[in-house]
């Protein structure tokens, strides 16, 4: 295991690198760890769980999926912010981030084991809750490393790599489910092994910060981990709202993608699984193009807001095309434009949020970025509140047109939310 550097505070050595400079393998290991964590969680949430619910509860699969997503959202919200605060003040000899990366990966793997052997809907929901608790811990620590160890001049490009990992994970998950034996043990087990191995690699490579001065932590400080004053920090609040709305728009369509292919386009479950892998693969390829292009532009110019506007435009047009599609080709074209919008957004999103994150004298990146994380965790909780009534409109089955319209409204409002921000161009 790599050497650690004793420090009295996470804000120690320099503004850009609070800990020691990292070894050459740090960046590849960080991106791979994020990809592994995302593959484990997103392949389950977007592919494997919808498939299992089609088998366990075919009549009420949409409603049950909404409930499953909501429970997972509640769990990840409950654990991420307090764990971020505890990570910041940890005096563990292994460092402030390592235990949470490894511990989170192990808990996620446990949740995936429960999912693999679940034969009832309650057991499936319980397994997902456990997996989300672990995923929240791991991603909290990995995002904290982005703020602590990545200099601002390349942060958009590294954030783009994180974003591409998130976009690639469902595509890999769909492909894995398509080529693996038709057995939940493989659907959930193989991604769990990949996630565990990649995060162990991160723990081995990381030269972590070791805090030597204990900081008292009480219930009040843990609860404060959920709060950054939106009146005092208006720019951060607007950026937070932007991410919330953009994420809600994307999650609304991505969560129900398999059902869109079966119920709206008339594909069989087997054909829909194969088509989903193709659609998500095209979406990922499109997101790579815009992510690489716009991250370079953003880092060169220092401008973030115009790229958010471009992202909203790409996504809204893509959703309109997908909503109107009567066949798989046009639908895929629309989702490709959504992918372009996603790629443009993720490459500047994390960079913008970390630049606007208020400094706190007694806490580090874990607590602050836990508040940031709420902006993409809350949509999992809000999705059933928004999607269920939209899908229930009318008497002809799930109303996916209403779902698309709601997603378009959310993405437009998300783009407009960055207009009032003053301290980011």
Image (cartoon, grey):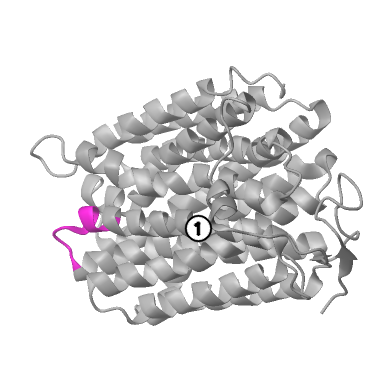
Q: Is residue 69 visible to the viewer in this orientation of the structure?
A: yes
Estimate the x, y position of residue 6 in percent, counting from the top left.
88, 67
Quadrant where the N terminus is found in the figure: bottom right
The residue at the point 50 percent across, 58 percent down is 171
Position of 156 with respect to 222 (left or right) is right
Estimate the x, y position of residue 238 in percent, counting from the top left.
56, 27
Asked if residue 121 is among those painted magenta in the image, a careful observer would answer: no
Q: Quadrant of residue 68?
A: bottom left
Quadrant where the C terminus is found in the figure: top right
Estimate the x, y position of residue 185 in percent, counting from the top left.
39, 81
Q: State whether residue 376 is above or below residue 45.
A: above
Q: State whether residue 74 is above or below residue 235.
A: below
Estimate the x, y position of residue 263 in percent, counting from the top left.
22, 49
Q: Determine which residue is flagged by label 1.
A: 171
Position of 419 with respect to 200 (left or right) is left
The residue at the point 81 percent across, 43 percent down is 154
Taking the view exactly as shown, the residue that stands out farthest to the left is 395
The residue at the point 50 percent across, 60 percent down is 79
Binning the other alpha carbons within 10 Å of mark 1 as few (below 14), some (14 to 19) or many (20 upward) gives: many
Q: Quadrant of residue 115?
A: bottom left
**Element under disc 1:** helix
Q: Observer-nearest residue: 161 or 76?
A: 76
Q: Is residue 174 visible to the viewer in this orientation of the structure?
A: no
Position of 394 with respect to 117 (left or right) is left
Looking at the rendering, the stretch of residues picked out in magenta corresponds to: 57-65
């Amino acid at each position: 295991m790599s050497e650690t550097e004793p420090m009295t505070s996470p804000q120690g050595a320099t503004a850009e690198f609070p800990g020691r400079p990292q070894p050459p393998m740090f960046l590849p290991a960080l991106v791979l760890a994020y990809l592994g964590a995302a593959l484990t969680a997103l392949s389950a949430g977007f592919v494997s769980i919808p498939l299992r619910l089609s088998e366990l509860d075919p009549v009420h699969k949409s409603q049950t999926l909404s409930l499953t997503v909501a429970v997972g959202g509640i769990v990840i919200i409950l654990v991420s912010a307090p764990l971020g605060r505890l990570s910041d003040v940890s005096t563990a000899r292994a460092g402030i981030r390592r235990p949470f990366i490894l511990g989170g990966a192990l808990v996620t793997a446990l949740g995936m084991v429960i999912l693999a052997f679940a034969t009832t809907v309650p057991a499936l929901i319980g397994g997902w809750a456990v997996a989300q608790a672990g995923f929240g811990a791991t991603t909290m620590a990995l995002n904290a490393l982005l703020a602590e160890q990545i200099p601002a001049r390349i942060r958009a490009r590294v954030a783009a790599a994180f974003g591409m990992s998130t976009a690639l994970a469902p595509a890999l998950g769909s492909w894995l489910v398509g080529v693996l034996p038709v057995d939940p043990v493989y659907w959930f087990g193989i991604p769990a092994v990949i996630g565990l191995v990649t995060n162990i690699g991160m723990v081995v490579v990381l030269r972590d910060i070791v805090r030597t001065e204990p900081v008292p932590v009480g219930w009040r400080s843990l609860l404060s981990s959920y709060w950054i004053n939106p009146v005092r920090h208006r720019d951060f609040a607007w950026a937070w709202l932007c991410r919330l709305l953009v994420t809600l728009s994307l999650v609304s369509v991505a969560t129900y993608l398999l059902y869109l292919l079966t119920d709206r386009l008339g594909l069989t479950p087997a054909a829909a699984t194969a088509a989903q892998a193709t659609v998500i693969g095209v979406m990922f390829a499109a997101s790579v193009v815009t992510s690489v292009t716009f991250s370079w532009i953003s880092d060169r110019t220092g401008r973030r807001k115009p790229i958010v506007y471009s992202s909203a435009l790409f996504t809204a047009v893509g959703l309109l095309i997908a909503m109107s599609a009567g066949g798989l080709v046009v639908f895929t074209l629309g989702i490709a434009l959504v992918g372009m919008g996603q790629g443009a957004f993720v490459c500047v999103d994390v960079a913008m949020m970390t630049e606007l994150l208020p400094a706190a004298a007694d806490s580090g990146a874990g607590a602050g970025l836990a508040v940031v994380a709420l902006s993409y965790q809350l949509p999992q909780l809000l999705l059933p509140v928004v999607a269920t009534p939209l899908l229930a409109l009318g008497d002809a089955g799930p109303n996916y047109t209403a779902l698309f319209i709601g997603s378009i409204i959310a993405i437009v409002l998300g783009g407009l939310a960055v207009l009032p921000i003053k301290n980011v161009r």
